[in-house]
Structures are given as structure tokens and as C-alpha cells.
Image (cartoon, rainbow, N blue to C red):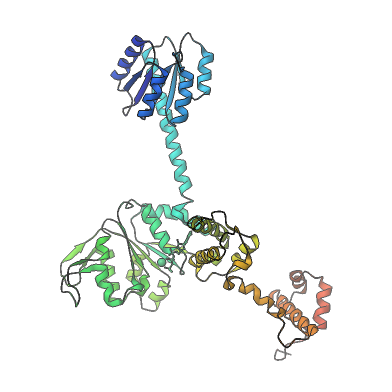
Amino acid sequence: MPEKSVHLLLVEDVDTLREATAEHLEEHGYQVTQASSGEAALERLAGFAFDIVVTDLRLPGIDGTELIERAVQQYPGLIGIVVTGYGTIKDAVEAIRRGARDFITKPFQFAHLRHVLESAVEQRRLQSENAYLRSQLEDRYRFEGIVGRSEPMRRLFGLLETVAASSSTVLITGETGTGKELVAKAIHHNSPRRRERFVALNCGAIPESLLEAELFGHVRGAFTGAVGNRQGRLEQAHKGTFFLDEVGTMSAGLQAKLLRVLQEREFERVGDGRPVRVDVRVIAATNSDLAAMVRDGVFRDDLYYRLNVLPIHLPPLRERREDIPPLVHAFLQKLGRDLEPPRPDAAFSQEALRRMMAFDWPGNIRQLENVVERTLALTPGRTQLNVADLPQEIVGGADRHLAAAVLPDDGLDLQRRLQEVERAIIRQALEQSGGNKHQAARMLNVKRTTLVEKVKRLRLDAPPPNGPS
Ligand SMILES: Nc1ncnc2c1ncn2[C@@H]1O[C@H](COP(=O)(O)OP(=O)(O)OP(=O)(O)O)[C@@H](O)[C@H]1O
Ligand SMILES: [Mg+2]
């Protein structure tokens, strides 16, 4: 007996055989629809999502093999079983080659037919389960639009899965623009609360005087301007996720009230003495060093421990530069699609990418995204984007080295300028190699003897004027 009602289309032109088979299968829990020709079968298939089609091979008009081939191609997941007369195995093999899952030969025992059907259904169940597991696995590396292939990001993807499944409080730390809010949303959308609300409150963006009412809500007349009752963000997040951004900016008074929420899931609306209970999953984020603030006595240690149950740290972009090319690619795709006309194939030259990888990105991923957007906006219609298209702030670092190559209005002494540049660069090489001439020569791509000679000529080995003699 099939576990769940299986819908089966039975195609057979001999009425008595078809009716007897249908009756038998119905007695065993199948939902059977009958068709007496291939054409009729195709019509039925178009109107309903059958699980299985069982067809005789010899049919007037479209034969069974062709029927199976068309049906399986058009309705993936549909199981095709063929019934062959006279033991013509060759035809059965052909039908299987064209998409049938199995075959039985006439005359057959009903029990044998049922056995074939049951094992085909079971096989398909396992297959779709495998496909499901595979897609789950792929999703681990595509967590809700979070791009990254660096080691820290791979570790993050693994961690996010565990964190999303749990209901514990999360503390996300990281510099500005590292993706804290993006990660908070990804956790919510992969958690059992995904169907409920994700409500955010940025403590740093709201004046202290209004923050409490915003968080907990207020009743009418609680303070000047409180004209009606108002729900706070915490209540709005009931059953869902509450994202408390920039938690490091909270005053001592609010810290105490937040602690109570975390401990008892309970608070009071401003101007009201009655406790309100909520079921929320709290995710907090900060770009300040909360541990240091605890040491300095400006952040409650008990609150810190309550928040820091599941810590997630997002490293700055300059510590995971290999994420820059895939991020740039993702932003080009996303932003290029929205342009008018769309430019999905715009790409940076290798040199431009190298320059971006060399930059330190104090504004992290947000800054990178802005740069890609700005560059796209300034290069209408182009597919290749070059170093010259990047904003000065990104390539400026490299241009500083070329400052020495600027000809002042009043001219210069070329020999002296070249010597200055040479001297400055050799000094840096010696500094960076800790005075090791062999290593310094390698950095400058000159022979060691050449370097020694230059050092002597430029008097770079003389002790510094104020150094120890
Ligand atoms: N790994 C990533 N993959 C793709 N986009 C990212 C990634 N990280 C961040 N972003 C994008 O960068 C921008 C900044 O991210 P987000 O707002 O989450 O940063 P934040 O850490 O909350 O910053 P702030 O501390 O300034 O609030 C967003 O547009 C976000 O979608
Ligand atoms: Mg943020």
C-alpha cells in the first residue's frame, strides 16, 4: 500500500484489462485515471500532476515509447512504467532508454505490478531527498547573498547554520560596513522564526530621550507628545527576531532595562506599570569594543555576557582581500542589472582589481559597493572598467609614488631628483629587510654588488647623524 495517495495514469487500449487493473490498484490505495490511447493520455497529463504513468507499449496512434518519452521530458519527476506484450524485451529496453523507469511483461500478476510501482515510488522519494540535501549543502556557501570565499567567511557560513537553528542571543561585532546587518538578517531568514518579523532598532541613530519609548512603547500621556498608546519595537518583534544595532551606545539606565528583557523577556511600556511579555530572539551588533567598555566601566558586564552568548566577528575587508574580486563581481552583476540600459557584462580590468585589492577599505564592504556603483555611473555604455575609472581615493596611494615624477612650474635638476628617488627607495628596502643587503637587493631586483655600490655612492651606510656612534 503506498504511503500517501499515489496518482497513477493507466494507458491501455484493451478495455477489460485496463478496467480490471484499475480496479485492483484502486483497492490497494492508488488513485487511478484511465486512458485508452496515447493522445488521450497526453491530454490527461497536461491537466494534472500525476506521479506515475503506466502504459502499454502497443497502442493505436502514439505508441507507449513515444508517450513515455514526451511525458518524462515535459513533466520531470513523473515515473514512467511500460507494459510489453509477448516478452518483447527489445522494445522495453528502448522505452527505458527514452525515459521509462521500469517495465513489466504481459501477462503479469497484479502483485508483481504493485511491487514494481512501489519500488519506483520509493526510488523517486530517495532521489528527491538527495536533491534536497544537495541543495541544502550548496546553500551553506550562499547564505542569503553573503559573498565570500576567504577562510574566515567559510567558517562564518558553517557557524551561521548552527546559529540560525538556535534561539540564543547573538552578538555581532565588526567595523562599519563589514556586513553586520546583512548577517543578522541572514540568521533570521534561516531560523525557525523566518516567517515572523525581523525588527531593527539602531540605538545610535535615535536620541537617548526617545530611545526608551521606541524600544518599549508608551501609553498615552506618558510624556509630552505621547498622544496615544504606541507599541515599541520589541513588541513588534514578538515571535520574530529583534535586531539591536549599535548596542554600545546605550545609556546605563537603558542597559539595565535591556538586561531585564534578556533575562525575563519582560518589560514595561513607558508610563505604564504593567509588565509586557514578549517572545523574541535578540541579535545585537556593535562596532565598538564592548569588552574594553566593560573594563572601563561604561558597559554593564552582566549585560555583556547576556548578549555575547553566540559571538560572531566579521573581520575587516583588508584582512580578507581575496573576498574583493567575488564581491566586486557580485556588485557589478547586481548594480549593472538595475541600470538603464542594463550592463550585466561590465567588468574591471585585472590591474583595476589589483588596485582595489591593494586598498585598505576603511569603510569596508559598503565602501567597496559604493565605489563599484560610482564607477558604473561614470562609465556609461562601457564594458571594461580601468584603473583610470576608479576614484582617486582608491588609486591615490599608488600615485603618491609618482609625486616625484611631477615637473614643477619652475623646473628641476633631473640628476638630483633621480638620486633623491633612488636614495629614498633604497633606504626603504634596507629598512624593510632589517639591513640585510641580500634581501634588499632582491626586493629591488638588482644584484647584491650593485646595491652595495649604490649604498656607498649615496652614502647610505653612514650612521645617522643623531644615532649611536
Ligand atoms: N559578505 C557580503 N557580501 C555581499 N554584500 C555584503 C557583504 N557584507 C556586506 N555587504 C553589503 O555591504 C553593505 C554594508 O553592510 P551592512 O549594512 O550589513 O554593514 P554593517 O556592518 O551593519 O555596517 P555599520 O556598522 O556601518 O552599520 C550592505 O549593502 C551589504 O549588503
Ligand atoms: Mg549596520
Residue 313 x/y as whole percent = 45, 64
Q: Quadrant of residue 208?
A: bottom left
Q: Who is closer to the viewer here, 246 or 307?
A: 246
Total labels: the figure holds: 0
Is residue 61 in view from this perspective?
Answer: yes
Residue 322 x/y as whole percent = 58, 60
Q: Is residue 185 left or right of residue 460?
A: left
Is residue 100 in view from this perspective?
Answer: no
Q: Is residue 457 left or right of residue 59?
A: right
Residue at 54% across / 56% down in the picture? Answer: 343
Residue 277 x/y as whole percent = 21, 61
Q: Is residue 443 left or right of residue 171?
A: right
Residue 462 x/y as whole percent = 77, 86
Q: In the rendered view, would you say 72 is above or below 55?
A: below
Quarter containing ligand 2? bottom left
Residue at 52% across / 15% down in the picture? Answer: 91
Residue at 42% across / 19% down in the picture? Answer: 38
Q: Quadrant of residue 111?
A: top left
Q: Who is closer to the viewer here, 77 or 389?
A: 389
Q: Who is closer to the viewer here, 320 or 327?
A: 327
